[in-house]
Image (cartoon, helix red, strand yellow):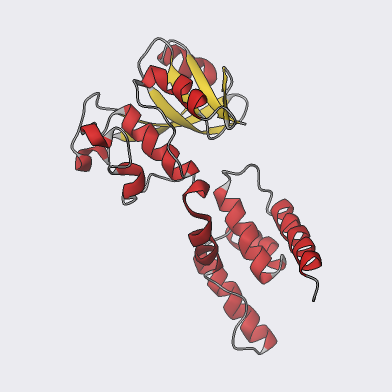
């Protein structure tokens, strides 16, 4: 191909096919996005092979596939087994793994960039929600108050990106209405809501203690409303 615009068009269509074949559900469906990306690099035959033999993408099976194709085709190299790492270093923080665990080595999210870290509030629900939001979106959520204020402050800070709702979306921030608390919504299927939240022990910790003072839990929306005496959400638009 010699026409740059045509090359980009074909590349986008090819990647779209990979996204569909990998059954990517939403922008936070990181595992299947990785599968689609590796399929884009190898050719989408990798996608069905990885699903059939391993249930999805892994760096290990990407290397297995490359070795298998090298032997099959009699070549010394096939694709890039480290393609995901090479792509993600450019995508950066705004493409965080919402379904994964916090990366407390990321000091931009958990260190002094975190508003609550500046006051030593490690382990507080606000500190945790601020850090996870930054990991996922790559920018400050803009909230600086108590947990029950965070949704309103986030929507006020980013009105073009978030909206207030009584029904969640994956990637939302939730605030308790009758209970001073905030957390992150990592999954929602219309009935069950999976959240990540900090401050399980109810106190401010050292940074080392705060690394273990969080949890991932699944409730029905009714249960979550009952626990926190009502919840509201700042949903990504």
| Residue at the (37%, 39%) spot, across then down | 131
| Residue at the (51%, 47%) spot, across then down | 94
- Asked whether residue 167 appears in the rendered view, the answer is yes
Position of residue 71 relative to residue 40, above or below, is below
Position of residue 230 relative to residue 65, above or below, is above
Q: Is residue 51 left or right of residue 158?
A: right
Image location of residue 57, percent across then percent down = 57, 60
Image location of residue 129, percent across then percent down = 39, 32
- Asked whether residue 219 appears in the rendered view, the answer is no
| Residue 201 quadrant | top left
Q: Is residue 75 left or right of residue 148?
A: right
Residue farthest along the left direction in this orientation: 206
| Residue 180 quadrant | top left
Q: Quadrant of the N terminus?
A: bottom right
Position of residue 88 relative to residue 2, above or below, is above
Image location of residue 194, percent across then percent down = 49, 31
Q: Quadrant of the C terminus?
A: top right
Which residue is more in the foreground, 185 or 157? 157
Q: Is residue 170 left or right of residue 134?
A: right
Image location of residue 184, percent across then percent down = 45, 31
| Residue 190 quadrant | top right
Total residue callouts: 0
Which residue is more in the foreground, 151 or 219? 151
Q: Is residue 132 left or right of residue 222?
A: left
Which residue is more in the foreground, 207 or 53? 207
| Residue at the (81%, 66%) spot, across then down | 6
| Residue at the (70%, 53%) spot, across then down | 19
């Amino acid at each position: 191909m010699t026409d740059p615009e045509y090359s980009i068009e074909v590349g986008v269509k090819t990647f779209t096919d990979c996204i569909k074949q990998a059954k990517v559900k939403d922008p936070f469906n990181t595992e299947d996005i990785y599968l689609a990306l590796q399929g884009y690099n190898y050719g989408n035959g990798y996608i069905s092979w990885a699903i059939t033999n391993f249930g999805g993408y892994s760096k290990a099976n990407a290397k297995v596939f490359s070795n298998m194709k090298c032997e099959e085709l009699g070549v010394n190299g096939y694709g890039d087994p480290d393609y995901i790492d090479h792509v993600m270093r450019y995508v950066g923080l705004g493409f965080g793994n919402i379904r994964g665990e916090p990366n407390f080595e990321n000091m931009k999210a958990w260190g002094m960039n975190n508003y609550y870290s500046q006051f030593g509030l490690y382990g507080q629900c606000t500190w945790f929600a601020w850090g996870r939001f930054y990991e996922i979106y790559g920018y400050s959520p803009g909230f600086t108050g108590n947990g029950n204020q965070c949704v309103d402050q986030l929507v006020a800070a980013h009105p073009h990106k978030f909206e207030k709702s009584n029904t969640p979306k994956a990637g939302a921030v939730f605030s308790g209405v009758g209970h001073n608390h905030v957390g992150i919504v990592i999954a929602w299927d219309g009935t069950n809501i999976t959240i990540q939240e900090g401050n399980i022990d109810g106190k401010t910790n050292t940074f080392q203690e705060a690394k273990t003072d969080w949890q991932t839990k699944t409730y029905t929306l009714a249960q979550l409303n009952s626990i926190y005496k009502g919840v509201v959400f700042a949903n990504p638009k």
